[in-house]
Image (spheres, rainbow, N blue to C red):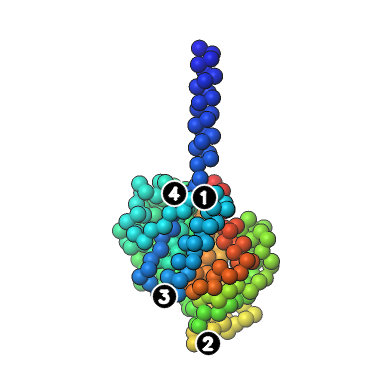
């Protein structure tokens, strides 16, 4: 009897060890039917995240079919990434349930886009209550300031650095005004006006570009336009830290 108990304990222990060691799975959603610079970004991001998965020990799947965002399928994934699109209304409830029950989300650039006509109120609250304000045009490099040097996401990133060419978005109101939001990185206003044809100005004195909603395991990066996004090892550090933090966090 005692021997049986030992065998059982060993077997069960072995199983739980196996379960712990199974690699986390990450599901990337992308669209090819969007602005060319957003397709370029998504294409590079898929390669970048697959390589990061090899290094950090997670497994990446990618899909352009939003029907894959259903409750059953999402159960397999520790993290869902929206590279350059937002799900249609029919898939939104599945995502809400996934996030409310501890799912993980990483969104880039246009993934947080919403405006006064958007009807997904849960999502607006989720990303900090702001609607798209204005973008700089053409896309430009920008000086960014780290707001939260203590965050695991900003470890090894200097207090200020120049990020590669991107189309930057402002948000109204700034997500910082939501007490659930923790802003990690902001556009430095000393470079205003930013842009030529379309400008970010003092009309938006506070433009967070990386933040998290502390009620969820989520992270948003405003980067995601064009082919230069992964050209900075400093900025890549933010991405690597961010993915690793989302996969680790309870
Ligand atoms: Zn863009």
Give the CA distance from mark 3 to mark 4. Answer: 28 Å
Cβ–Cβ below 8 Å for labels 3 and 4?
no
- Inter-mark Cα distance, 2 to 3: 20 Å
Q: Residue at x 36, y 61 (%)?
A: 64
Disc 1 marks which residue? 58
- Which mark identifies residue 77? 4
**Residue 52: where, in percent of width, then height?**
55, 56
Residue 178, percent from left and from top: 52, 63
From the viewer's perspective, is the residue at label 1 or at label 2 nearer?
1
Is any atom of residue 177 visible in this view? no
User: How far apart in space, not on screen, are marks 1 and 2 (Cα)?
Assistant: 41 Å
Q: Position of residue 171 (x, y in %)?
A: 50, 72
Q: Position of residue 164 (x, y in %)?
A: 58, 74
Q: Residue at x 44, y 49 (%)?
A: 77
Which quadrant holds residue 85?
A: bottom left
Q: Residues within 10 Å of mark 4 (few under 14, many from 20)?
A: some
């Amino acid at each position: 009897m005692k021997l049986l108990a030992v065998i059982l304990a060993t077997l069960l222990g072995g199983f739980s060890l196996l379960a712990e060691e199974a690699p986390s799975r990450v599901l990337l959603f992308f669209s090819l039917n969007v602005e060319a610079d957003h397709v370029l970004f998504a294409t590079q991001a898929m390669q970048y995240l697959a390589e990061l998965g090899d290094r950090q020990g997670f497994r990446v799947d990618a899909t352009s079919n939003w029907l894959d965002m259903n409750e059953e399928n999402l159960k397999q994934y520790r993290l869902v990434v929206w590279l350059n699109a937002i799900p249609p209304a029919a898939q939104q409830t599945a995502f809400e349930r996934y996030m409310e029950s501890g799912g993980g989300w990483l969104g880039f650039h246009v993934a947080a886009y919403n405006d006064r006509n958007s009807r997904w109120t849960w999502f607006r609250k989720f990303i900090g209550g702001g609607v798209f304000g204005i973008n700089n045009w053409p896309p430009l490099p920008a000086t960014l300031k780290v707001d939260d040097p203590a965050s695991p996401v900003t470890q090894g990133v200097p207090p200020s650095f120049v990020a590669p060419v991107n189309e930057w978005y402002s948000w109204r109101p700034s997500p910082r005004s939501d007490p659930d939001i923790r802003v990690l990185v902001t556009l430095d206003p000393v470079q205003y006006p930013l842009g030529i044809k379309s400008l970010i100005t003092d009309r938006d004195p506070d433009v967070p570009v990386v933040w998290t909603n502390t009620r969820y395991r989520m992270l948003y990066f405003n980067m995601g336009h064009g082919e230069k996004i992964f050209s900075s090892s400093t900025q890549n550090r933010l991405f690597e830290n961010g993915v690793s933090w989302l996969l680790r966090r309870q």
